Amino acid sequence: MANNEEFQFRKLNDLLCTSFNNIKYDVRDINGKIENLKTDFSGFATESIKTAFDEQTKLILEQQRALNQLGERLNELETRKPEVVREIRQVSAPPVSQVFKSKESALSEVRNMLRDDARAKETRESLYDIPEGDVRITKTQFKASGNGKKKLNQEWVEVTGYGVDMTGFKLHDKGRKHTFTFPNKFKIYGPVKIFTGKGRNTNTKLYWKSKTAVWNDKGDVATLRDKHGKVLSQVLSEPTYSFKQLR
């Protein structure tokens, strides 16, 4: 029954749209015919002018009758539409791909959504739950959009720490093909992004100043080492946008 009501509403809606389009085209046609009436008849014989006017008048009257009929039909549709809309709203509230068979199943789905959201929030917060004096990699973006060579600063690695002197610390890719050394006496207080390209260093942004891409678009491993070479943090990032802390 609900499906039939929704079908009827869609059918009426399509008819309504078609009717409005018909009116638009009819009005445009009438305007064109009225423009034709502005023709200079000074060189025409009287009988010819009378015939032309009679033909134009006949066409305009026909168009007017058509418009009146469409207007009546639209009024009918408009009076029926609100009732149909109210019915459809009641029967089609759940998404088409997810119609719940009972109140319990709907509530269960809501609980699952809330639980998943809470887990995601917990994961996001735990990334930055770093003890003071420690530092780790918290986010990465290895793939630049479009031409990576021209958008090197769309590649970056985010390192987070609190009250850590990063002098001598290094960040490198898999196989240590590219290595970034943190500036001397640079202290980290929160998240800092290390961009591949050029730029002006700040408290929250550092620039590798590389002329080529550093990170592999198909997936790479970012490793952070302290001044003694000890691995402090290591993550694997892949094209599927997965982010896994290796240590």
Image (cartoon, grey):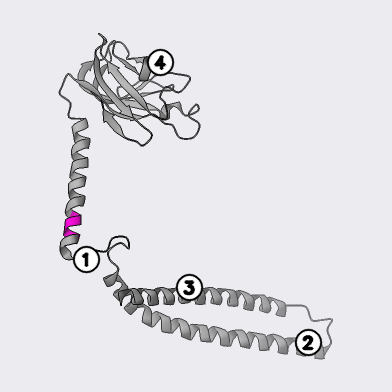
| Residues at discs 1 and 2 in contact (Cβ within 8 Å) | no
| Residues at discs 1 and 3 in contact (Cβ within 8 Å) | no
> Where the C terminus falls, by quadrant?
top left
Q: Is residue 58 magenta?
A: no
Q: Nearer the viewer, mark 1 or mark 4?
A: 1
Q: Is residue 188 visible?
A: yes
The numbered mark, 3 or 4, whose residue comes first in the sequence reads 3
The numbered mark, 1 or 2, whose residue comes first in the sequence reads 2
Q: In the figure, residue 7 lies in which quadrant?
A: bottom left
- The image shows residue 58, relative to residue 238, as above or below, that is below
Q: Which residues are magenta?
A: 106-110
Q: Nearer the viewer, mark 3 or mark 4?
A: 4
Q: Residues within 10 Å of mark 2 (few under 14, many from 20)?
A: some
The residues bearing labels 1 and 4 have C-alpha atoms spaced at a distance of 57 Å
Q: Which residue is mark 4?
A: 177
The numbered mark, 1 or 3, whose residue comes first in the sequence reads 3
Q: Is residue 173 visible?
A: no
Q: Amino acid at mark 1?
A: Lys
- For label 2, the SS is helix
Q: Which residue is mark 1?
A: 101
The residues bearing labels 3 and 4 have C-alpha atoms spaced at a distance of 62 Å
Residue depicted at x 27% and y 30%: 244
- For label 3, the SS is helix
Q: Residues within 10 Å of mark 4 (few under 14, many from 20)?
A: few
Q: Which residue is mark 2?
A: 49
Q: Residues within 10 Å of mark 3 (few under 14, many from 20)?
A: few
- Residue 17, label in figure: 3
Outermost residue on the top side: it is 228
